[in-house]
Each structure stands twice: as structure tokens, then as C-alpha cells.
Image (cartoon, rainbow, N blue to C red):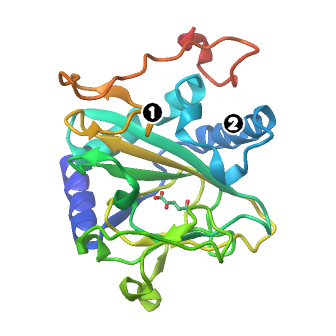
């Protein structure tokens, strides 16, 4: 990415609270991620496809390979600087007809991060459309301070909580429709969510939350810290080592021989 493109992305993100990058990764890698989800669901039959959480990451070479892809790290560094660590990553996949909504919320309200310097890359592994419950944002709401999220158990949703309705003007919402390999990138304060999947197609999405190594995860176990670029800071975060690929134990992927 050249400096002019980085400037364009940064300006859009600062103005709107989000930006879309098309073809951030190649379709073959996106397709491997879809296979990974099927593999994870088979290995973890008690987990719902919306709930493939960060605690699965440290012992999963493909997951670490995917979130440390240099193309994604280059993008993250536009927003958080050249040193890039992982705070957390979570597949939110919605099965046809039953995939749950994500109620309107601000991410930062849930996160034990100090300071709140963090950006999310939302990677479309398959097509993400209005019908299958793509992510939606309200542009400009990243300028709103972090609010307390309120519990809502009346709707079957992924988070079970939401921002108060007075902060949500749905008439201004933008659907982030993405093709496999595209990413949307969003600020931790932007008001966003997604609707249930009413289509007969799966929606496959991977959230990836990047921080600089100067940001501390203040609650142990709240994330899956890895340091991909830069130097650790004393007393800030214990980073996991890169997991080794073991045939028969891990999801096989292109290049897994380099992870042994
Ligand atoms: O995947 C979704 O529908 C919502 C994602 C989200 O809330 C996030 O990445 O912060």
C-alpha cells in the first residue's frame, strides 16, 4: 500500500469511524477460513457458529497464520502505528435462517484495554450481504463517548446487550456488504451491529482486534495476546508463542509445513 492510499484510508476512518478495503486477502485464503470454521464446529460441537471465541486461537496455527497475514498487519498499522499486537479474534458466523443478530453497540464498552487504542478488521470469509446479516454501522458515531451497554434478553442475539436506543438513528445506518477477502475496519467507539440471517446462505465473518504493544489488556484471559510486529513493553501483556502445526491435530492449510 502506498502512502497516498494509507492517507485516504486514515482520513475516511477518522471522518466516518470505518472504512472498507476490497480484496484485502486473496479468495483462496478466504475459502480456507470457511473450511476452518467447518473444522472448528466439528471439533467443538457444543459451540454455536457465532461463538468461536478468542480462547480457541492460541493453539490454532491456521488462525494465527491468518490474523498475522502481512496484508492485514499493514492495514492495521495505518490505524494503530507500525507495532502491531493481537488483542482478540472471534469468528461470528451466521447459519442460514437461524443466525443471530448482533444488537447495536460500541465495542470499547466491553473491553478491558488501557488506553483504548485498538482497531478492528472484520474479514469477510464468504459473501456478507444485507440478507445474510452483514455488519451495519452508523457513520460518525465514533465521536460519541463510550456508553454503558444495557442487557436485552428479549431478542435472541449474540451479545445479549445493546446501547440505549436514544443513541441509534437507524435511518443513517450503512450496510457493509462485502465479498470474500474484503475487510471493513472500524473504530472501537462506532455504533454498529447486524441483523439476523434471514437468507438461505451462511454468513462467515472473522473479527480481528489489533492493538499497539503500549495498550494493556487489563483482565487476564480477556483476549489472546500475540505480538506480531514491534517490541514488548515491560509489564504490559504476556504474549503467546506462535503455535506449532501438528498433523492430525490442527487444521491443515497452505504453508502449514512452515509452522512445524
Ligand atoms: O459480525 C457482526 O455481525 C458484528 C461484528 C461486531 O460487532 C464487531 O466486529 O465488533
Can I make out residue 116 in this image?
A: yes
Question: Which-is-in-front pick, marks 1 and 2?
Answer: 1
Residue on which the image places disc 1: 224
Q: Is mark 1 within 8 Å of ligand 1?
A: no
Determine the residue located farthest toward the bottom in the rendered image. Answer: 171
Can I make out residue 1 in this image?
A: no
Q: Is residue 108 left or right of residue 104?
A: left
- The image shows residue 166 at horizontal and vertical percentages of 38, 88
Q: Is residue 230 left or right of residue 24?
A: left
| Quadrant of residue 42 within the rendered picture | top right
- Crowdedness of circle 2 by 10 Å Cα count: few (<14), some, many (20+)? some
Q: Residue at x 34, y 58 (%)?
A: 108
Distance Cα–Cα, label 1 vs label 2 = 18 Å
Determine the residue located farthest toward the top in the rendered image. Answer: 260
- The image shows residue 122 at horizontal and vertical percentages of 48, 54
Front residue of this view, candidates 242 and 144: 144
Q: Residue at x 72, y 64 (%)?
A: 99
Residue on which the image places disc 2: 36
Q: Secondary structure at mark 1?
A: loop
Front residue of this view, candidates 241 and 223: 223
- The image shows residue 154 at horizontal and vertical percentages of 65, 77
Amino acid at each position: 500500500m502506498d502512502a497516498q492510499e494509507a492517507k485516504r484510508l486514515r482520513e475516511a476512518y477518522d471522518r466516518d469511524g470505518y472504512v472498507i478495503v476490497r480484496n484485502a486477502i486473496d479468495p483462496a485464503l478466504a475459502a480456507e477460513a470457511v473450511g476452518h470454521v467447518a473444522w472448528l464446529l466439528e471439533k467443538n460441537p457444543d459451540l454455536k457458529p457465532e461463538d468461536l471465541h478468542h480462547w480457541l486461537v492460541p493453539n490454532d496455527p491456521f488462525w494465527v497464520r491468518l490474523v498475522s497475514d502481512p496484508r492485514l498487519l499493514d492495514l492495521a498499522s495505518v490505524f494503530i502505528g507500525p507495532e502491531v499486537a493481537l488483542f482478540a479474534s472471534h469468528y461470528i458466523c451466521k447459519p442460514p435462517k437461524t443466525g443471530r443478530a448482533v444488537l447495536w453497540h460500541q465495542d470499547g464498552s466491553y473491553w478491558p484495554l488501557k488506553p483504548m487504542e485498538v482497531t478492528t478488521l472484520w474479514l469477510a470469509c464468504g459473501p456478507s450481504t444485507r440478507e445474510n446479516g452483514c455488519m451495519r454501522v452508523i457513520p460518525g458515531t465514533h465521536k460519541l463517548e463510550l456508553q454503558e451497554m444495557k442487557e436485552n434478553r428479549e431478542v435472541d442475539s449474540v451479545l445479549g446487550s445493546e446501547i440505549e436506543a436514544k443513541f441509534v438513528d437507524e435511518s443513517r445506518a450503512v450496510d457493509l456488504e462485502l465479498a470474500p477477502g474484503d475487510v471493513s475496519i472500524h473504530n472501537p467507539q462506532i455504533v454498529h451491529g447486524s441483523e439476523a440471517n434471514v437468507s438461505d446462505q451462511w454468513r462467515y465473518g472473522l473479527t480481528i482486534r489489533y492493538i499497539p504493544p503500549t495498550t494493556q489488556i487489563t483482565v487476564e484471559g480477556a483476549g489472546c495476546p500475540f505480538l506480531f510486529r514491534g517490541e514488548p513493553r515491560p509489564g504490559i501483556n504476556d504474549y503467546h508463542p506462535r503455535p506449532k502445526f501438528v498433523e492430525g491435530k490442527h487444521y491443515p492449510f497452505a504453508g502449514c509445513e512452515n509452522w512445524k
